Image (tube, grey):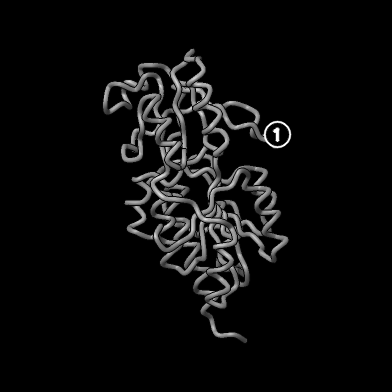
Amino acid sequence: MDKFGTEMTELLPEEPEEEQTAAVREEPPSHTRSGMVEGRNAIQEALRSGKTADRLYVQDGLRDPVVGQILSKVKKQGATVSFVKKQLLDQMSETGKHQGLILLCSAYEYASMEEIFRVAEEREEPPFIFLLDEIEDPHNLGAIIRTANLCGAHGVIIPKHRAVGLTATVVKASAGAVNYTPVVKVTNIAKTIDELKGRGLWFACADMDGEVMYNCNLTGPIGLVIGNEGSGVSRLVREKCDHIVSVPMKGNIDSLNASVAAGVLAYEIVRQRMAPKG
């Protein structure tokens, strides 16, 4: 998948982590229509009614008290704010009356981390969690959530920033799996790995330069880390992982689609979990 272009500037919510301080450039997702709210009054009402904001697009140079109030509310929810050109908002708009503001709301509510552990405890299984490091394609995210459900994983963790959220397209691509598999949104994947290590998990990171998955012990409480479609797992997250694992490939190209790689690795974990003990 090609990396995003340079049509917009993303303003991240204020966070103490160093990697969150720099603005990044990307194009707005054209795939999200359901859950899109346009115009100042409509956005204020959506936020007042309890809608969960995923991303707010603001026209470059737009500054007034109402815009300031909206910005403050979406930042408190941890949503991403992106300043874009008016032409881009015109392309995204369905009503033609965006007034310089378009809000994308989550199609589903996110779960808490405790829900993942509760599911594992109820099944009397060691936790098995997918951690997705900046997955950008909604079809990939939906497919991975679907795979996570089918292979018996207890939950999926995604980052708040530089990644797709639970949009309508993701929900559709998951074939209903979002109704059964907890999806947790976190501020920082690397710090989340540290926290989960404290709860007994170890982590396997997908990378084509890693050790072949058949030679790795993938049993026990495990987090499977899948990286961005173009750049893979980020350096900091990769360094936090206990093992770097790869899928053996015999063809003429050098990588698998992110959701396919996630499925292959997940079912190797399932195979090893089902293997007779001793």
Observer-nearest of 119 and 74: 74
Q: Where is residue 26 in the image (x, y as percent from the top left)?
A: 47, 28
Image coordinates for residue 271, horizontal then vertical, percent: 50, 74
**Quarter occupied by residue 16:** top right
From the viewer's perspective, is residue 239 above or below residue 273? above
242 relative position to 116: left or right: right
Q: Is residue 252 left or right of residue 154?
A: left
- Write the residue at 43% across / 28% down: 27
Q: In which quarter of the image is residue 200?
A: bottom right
Residue 256 or residue 252, whichever sits in front: 256
**Badge 1: residue crowd in 10 Å (few <14, some 14–19, many ≥20):** few
What residue would you read off at disc 1? 18
Q: In the rendered image of this protein, does residue 268 appear above or below residue 224? A: below
Task: Give the side of residue 239 with respect to residue 154, left or right.
Answer: right
In the rendered image, residue 102, in percent from the top left (x then y), is placed at: 39, 28
In this rendering, position of residue 171 left or right of residue 65: left
Number of labels in the image equals 1
Q: Residue 130, image x and y in percent?
A: 53, 58
In the displayed structure, would residue 208 be above or below residue 274? above
* Residue drawn at 56 percent across, 66 percent down: 128
Disc 1, SS: helix
Q: Residue furthest left?
A: 95
